[in-house]
Image (spheres, grey):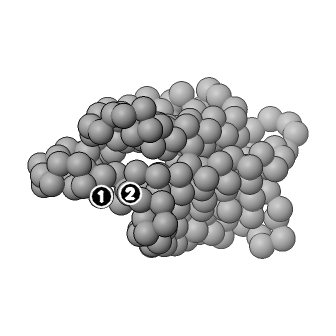
Amino acid sequence: MFRDRNLLILAAGQFASRLGDASFHLALIWLAKELTGSKRAMGLVAMLEYLPILLFGALAGVLVDRLDRRRVMLAASLVRAGLMLLVPLAFLAGYRGLVAGAFAAFGLALATSLFTPARDALVPQLVVGADRVGANALVQVSDQFAWLLGPLVYPLLVPWLGFTWAFLGPAVIFLASWLILRRLRMPAGPLPAAGRD
């Protein structure tokens, strides 16, 4: 399993993706606090991160089954990188409201709702037989590890960049995810049938 180049690339690319998600989550809540000082605003922007998954999660899974999963993950990583750049660019343009952050949160969650089922559906496409259990475990452990490390990224960036420019950190992380996942090579042939080894 650890010698499977494609599986290791998938685990590394999704690790970077989840690290970006987790660091953005903290960045967004921090932005809401800095701009408004309101607990209500902090809760609202945090809710916007989960709303697309609630509304479109099931549809995203169906859509991903009809698309090239690798391309879905690549597109989701690029979209999320662009959304992270939206916040500092809005501030650079003189906008000091929370709408840019809220829009970024909603868009990021929408892209993530496509990325995650594409990632999960890719594992059986890359790994056959009994190795699928270990492959799924590797992907899930890297996912949880990223959520553990993610909240460390943003606070490390704030002292150097300020709270809005620190959104560049998650943008770079999403670009790293895109670069890693570009190296993924899909096996030739038809998709394996569900439930067959």
> Could you tell me which quadrant the C terminus lies in?
bottom right
Residues at marks 2 and 1 touching, judged by CB atoms closer than 8 Å: yes
Q: Can residue 154 be seen in this view?
A: no
Residue at 29% over, 39% down? 96
Q: How many marks?
A: 2
> Could you tell me which quadrant the N terminus lies in?
bottom right
Q: Position of residue 9 (x, y in %)?
A: 75, 59
Is 161 placed above or below 40 here?
below
Q: Where is residue 17 in the image (x, y as percent from the top left)?
A: 57, 54
The residue that label 2 is drawn on is 163
Q: Position of residue 3 (x, y in %)?
A: 84, 71
Q: Where is residue 37 in the image (x, y as percent from the top left)?
A: 15, 54
Residue at 65% over, 28% down? 67
Q: Residues within 10 Å of mark 2 (few under 14, many from 20)?
A: some
**Residue 132 horizontal side relative to residue 53, left or right:** right
Is 138 placed above or below 77 here?
below
Is 64 placed above or below 38 here?
above
Give the camera-side residue of 112 and 45.
45
The residue that label 1 is drawn on is 30
Kindly identify which numbered label has been placed on residue 52: none
Q: Is mark 1 on a helix, strand or loop?
A: helix
Q: Which residue lies furthest to the right in this view?
A: 188
Residue type at mark 2? Answer: Phe
Dot in front, 2 or 1: 2
Q: Residues within 10 Å of mark 1 (few under 14, many from 20)?
A: some
Residue type at mark 1? Answer: Trp
Q: How far apart are marks 2 and 1 (CA)?
A: 8 Å
Residue at 79% over, 57% down? 6
The first of marks 2 and 1 along the sequence is 1
Q: Is mark 2 on a helix, strand or loop?
A: helix
